[in-house]
Amino acid sequence: MKQIELNDQIFELLLSSDKINEINTRLASNLNTDYEGKDPIILSVLDGSFMFCADLLRKLDFQHLFKFVKISSYTGMESTGEIKIETTLDLDLQGKEVLIIEDIVDTGRTMTAFVKYLKQKGAVDIKICTLLFKPEAIQSKPNLDYIGIEIKNEFVLGYGLDWDYRGRQYPDIYQLKKP
Ligand code: 5GP
């Protein structure tokens, strides 16, 4: 589909499923090289990253422990600025390597707060892999070790990313069309 309509708004195709698969293959290849022989804890941020994570994990060939973590910061199309880590992490992170899998880094506040939280729990080597990055929106820049693709500062949905819990089902990623 070239475009979709949701709640009277038009979203235009930004990344096709083929393009996303290409990006995922590149990211996985870099991760497979860097984590060869290692056994990190992979934490993936719900809800938006579930589809990306499912595809990426199937391309990884190193041992790891995996857990989803619920962090919230968005209402509608706006970041609330208030970061809530809603999952109790029942894992011993002391001295552990952690790889975070995130769908999108926008203001960067979520990742900055999460990295701080993980450091307080004793994690030593924390890396971030994000599918999408909006450089123009950044306010608090975490160290982004693996970036799928940089995009413009427009709201996107599809491939797990939602707008008020809708639009997650699309295999492609769509960007809000400006009037
Ligand atoms: P940040 O803290 O970097 O501003 O926001 C990160 C979170 O905001 C992401 O995990 C994602 O849930 C949400 N987010 C940021 N930009 C977008 C966007 O364009 N579309 C959607 N659907 N969610 C976004």
Image (tube, rainbow, N blue to C red):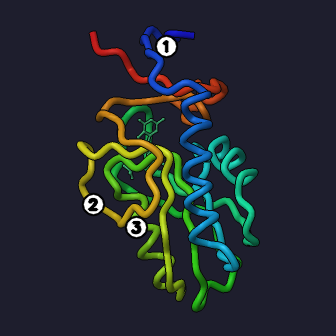
The residue carrying mark 3 is 113
In this view, 71 is above or below 49: below
Quarter holding the N terminus is: top right
Task: Report the residue at 61% width, 27% height from top.
Answer: 17
Circle 1: is it few (<14), some (14-19), or many (20+) Cα within 10 Å? few
Is label 1 in a helix, a strand or a loop?
Answer: loop
Task: Report the residue at 35% width, 15% height from top.
Answer: 177
In this view, 151 is above or below 3: below
Mark pair 3, 1: CA separation: 32 Å
Task: Report the residue at 70% width, 79% height from top.
Answer: 37
Circle 3: is it few (<14), some (14-19), or many (20+) Cα within 10 Å? some
Mark pair 2, 1: CA separation: 31 Å
Is label 2 in a helix, a strand or a loop?
Answer: loop
Q: Amino acid at mark 2?
A: Ser
Residue 27: % across, % down: 55, 52
Residue 164: % across, % down: 53, 30
Residue 5: % across, % down: 50, 9
In front of the other: 82 or 172:
172
Look at the numbered disc 3 and say if its residue's Cβ is closer than 8 Å to ligand 1: yes
The residue carrying mark 2 is 140
The residue carrying mark 1 is 7
Residue 12: % across, % down: 44, 15
In this view, 130 is above or below 142: above
Q: Which of disc 1 and disc 2 is earlier in sequence?
A: 1
